[in-house]
Image (tube, rainbow, N blue to C red):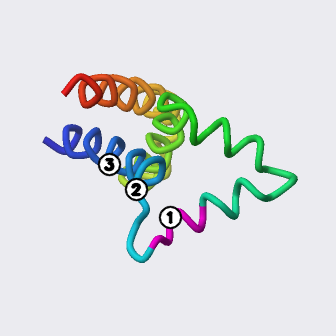
Amino acid sequence: MDILIAILAIYGLAFFVKETSGPFGVMDKLRSALMRNKHVGVFFFGLLDCWYCMGCWCGLAIYLLTQEPYKLSWAVCWALTGGAVSLMMNAILTRL
């Protein structure tokens, strides 16, 4: 059950960062500030444009928040799982 909750948390975080405006437009303002930055703007544009990329980073973030710090060998698996889950969930929600 913990893994199912973590998988849903990965997609929830990816959806929140990529699609929602957040409370009081906070996420919109943060995305705009990241895009205007001349040093990292291109990286964040590519990251926010791709569900797989966003899912990988969100999977890594959820892994670091939920697992013990001495089990870092599974971090790559969680990142790839997060990318795949985000891509599949987006395809399912697009069809609906």
| Above/below status of 26 relative to 2 | below
The amino acid type, in three-letter code, at marker 2 is Thr
The numbered disc on residue 12 is 3
Q: Which residue is mark 2?
A: 20
Q: Residues within 10 Å of mark 3 (few under 14, many from 20)?
A: some
**Which contiguous range is marked in magenta?**
25-30
Quarter of the image with the C terminus in it: top left
The span from disc 1 to disc 2 (Cα, nearest Å) is 7 Å
Q: Nearer the viewer, residue 61 or 17?
A: 17
How busy is the neighbourhood of tag 2: few (under 14 within 10 Å), some, or many (20 plus)?
few
Residue at disc 3, secondary structure: helix
Give SS at disc 1. Answer: helix
Residues at marks 1 and 2 touching, judged by CB atoms closer than 8 Å: yes
Location of residue 5 by image quarter: top left
Q: Earlier in the sequence, mark 3 or mark 2?
A: 3
Callout 3 amino acid: Gly
